[in-house]
Amino acid sequence: MQDTPSRSGPMALTPAQLDFWEEFTLHPDEPVSTIGHAVRLSGDLDEAALLRAINRACREAEVLSLRFHSGPDGVTQSLDPSRVPQAVLSDLRSFPDPGQEAAARMAADMAARLDLARDPLSLQRLWRTGERDWLWYNRGHHIILDGYAVALFEARVAQLYRHGTGQGDPGAPFRRFGDFLDEEAAYDAGPFRARDRAHWQAQLERPGRLEVLRKGGEDYAAEGLFAEPALDPRLPDRLAGLAARMRMGWPDLLVLAASAYLHAHLPRQEEVLPVWLPNMGRLGSVAAAVPCLAVNILPLHVSVGPQETFGAFLERMGHDLRALRRHGRYRIERIAADHGLGGGQRFFFSPLVNVMPFDPPVFPGCSATREVLANGPADGFNLSFRTGARGDGLAMAMDADPKLMGLAEFRCHARDIPAFLLRCLDPAAPGMAMEALFPPGLPA
């Protein structure tokens, strides 16, 4: 592990970072994109070893020490070693309800205004809440981290903890943030960018108009609708079985099944419904080993052919989804500029389907569960699926903007989506016509 930063001077922000910086300048008093995880540990924990592991991972994850600077030529960023977060241990067992005290502290921190121009962007806390219970609170901001990056950081901490307790090797440290920036620059100067740009220009010429929003007009302070509908316990096995039969990854099958429901039930002006999908963009990239903001968000133009079976839909839309992944490095911010969107405008990323297949970190002698504390602003209709890397522990969350969807309609979706998923992942479903798959309730 190197102790000197990979970059010593000011650096430009990536297009994704610039988007979050603009969000901050337009909503400076609202914690719109603060992200946080709570990892609950129960068992025989070596507190000192965990603190050492967290602090070493913080030194390796350079983005946790980023500082942003505003100047006459715009905003830049630099690595500031004095900003490397330090884990702090507190014993809450003297409180009447230690778990409630920890929850209140997390809620207060997540709700606090985070000034990107002044405040450190990462906070690491370890709270002891019982004789054999702890809570590790890991907070950051989306301008430096995405969901993959947070899971990568937690896995690295667990690896270092295992090594520190004599139960494994230390593994390789993270790649440097500068390596990621260099790779991004090489892509911008290379031939694949032009190929990917041509793909997205052709995609946006297809039917399926992308709605545009004026930045700054979002009402992020409004409380959104939220639900976590229960899923049938048979669903993970059905998902794995049908994915193997259709020869596609189970995350892609889940995305396409959810997209089929959205196409049938959400209002649209055309036969094609654009469904927005986060694209991790790590495969074959140094970003696979760099905690940073690398995720992209891209539209999948979903349509259903006349008399089409579910199996035919999966094959056809699976082809389009693979193309989205293949050309997924071209940033949505550049797609927007190519599409004629000027300053102060962005695409409306709704509806959105997000599948997050991340295992919780493994600490020997302890059980570990992860709780995601923020799902982002409810500015559309969003479906999130959290699961382990093999599809185990599948759970669904959904949120919506109450100005765009009424409570009664939202509750219908919360009832009908789990029923539809179970039905369309049945072994007989690929041979069924699409209209035969939809549950009663909202009209297809």
Image (tube, rainbow, N blue to C red):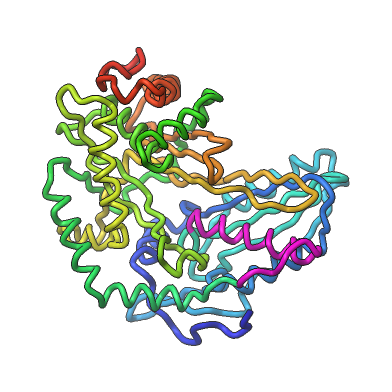
Residue 147 % position (x, y): 50, 53
Instruction: Pick the residue in front: 392 or 99.
Output: 392
Q: At 37% across and 24% down in the image, what residue appears?
A: 424
Residue 291 % position (x, y): 52, 65
Camera sees residue 267: yes
Camera sees residue 379: no
The answer to which image quadrant residue 250 occupies is top left
* Rendered position, 46 above or below 408: below
Q: Is residue 201 left or right of residue 255?
A: left
* Rendered position, 8 above or below 214: below
Instruction: Pick the residue in front: 67 or 236.
Output: 236
The C terminus - image quarter = top left
Q: Is residue 284 left or right of residue 115?
A: left
The N terminus - image quarter = bottom right
Is 256 colored magenta in this rendering? Answer: no
- Which residues are the magenta region? 146-172
